[in-house]
Amino acid sequence: WESDGRVSCEAPGQAPGVVSVRISSNGQQYSTSSVSYTYRMMESVFSLSQSTGPVGGGSIITVIGMGFLDSPTLSCRFGSHLVSATYVDKRRLICISPRGSFPGSVAISVSNNGINFSPSVLDFTYFENPFMTAVSVLSSTVTGGMPITFTTSHASLESHGELRCNFGALEVPAVVSGGDVTCTTPDVTGAEA
């Protein structure tokens, strides 16, 4: 008993489904009235669409798992930072990484109710955004094809995931070698307005 009219019970483990809950003061006679209580499958996480992102946050991450519910309290936890999640279906949800406290790895877990989190966790690694210190070429022809190498302030960028270069509205893949990033300029002849 917590107080007059209020009783707390810890729910024992049970297979998913709906059960009736009744109360008793002596363990023999139970209330005639009951409430329905739903056991559901515990949410679990299996993989992330990307496992790295900048320490400033803002990475859009698709979480793959099971047992997700379309709930207003659906959330992801990055280390100790809680963010709301967008329900896609019972096996996918989307979270936007919050600002990290520091570069390094944090555990990601999910919750349907914002209180109980998945026992399975995945690692997400925050990195500092690269700062360009030099560039090999400052101009190119509109037909593209020119490799441009950016030297950055980082000794190694391999752990940053898939890096890309953005040339105006066009994005191209980057090739990383240590702290250098090389991109080939895109053909912009069809992109001119």
Image: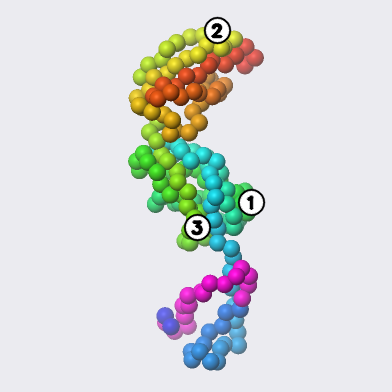
Residue to which mark 2 is pinned: 141
Seen in the picture, residue 109 relative to 102 is either above or below; the reply is: below
Other residues around mark 2 within 10 Å, as few (<14) / some (14–19) / many (≥20): few
Residue to which mark 3 is pinned: 118
Residue 164 is left or right of residue 126, and the answer is right
Along the viewing direction, whichever of 178 and 134 lies nearer the viewer = 178
Residue to which mark 1 is pinned: 89
Other residues around mark 3 within 10 Å, as few (<14) / some (14–19) / many (≥20): some
Marks 1/3: CA–CA distance: 17 Å
Task: Inspect the image, locate mark 2, and give the three-letter code of the amino acid beneath it.
Answer: Thr
> Looking at the picture, how far across and down is residue 159, in whole percent?
43, 34
Task: Inspect the image, locate mark 3, and give the three-letter code of the amino acid beneath it.
Answer: Ser
> Looking at the picture, how far across and down is residue 71, in whole percent?
58, 57
Task: Inspect the image, locate mark 1, and give the three-letter code of the amino acid beneath it.
Answer: Asp
Report the span colored magenta: 3-19
What kind of element bears circle 3?
Answer: loop
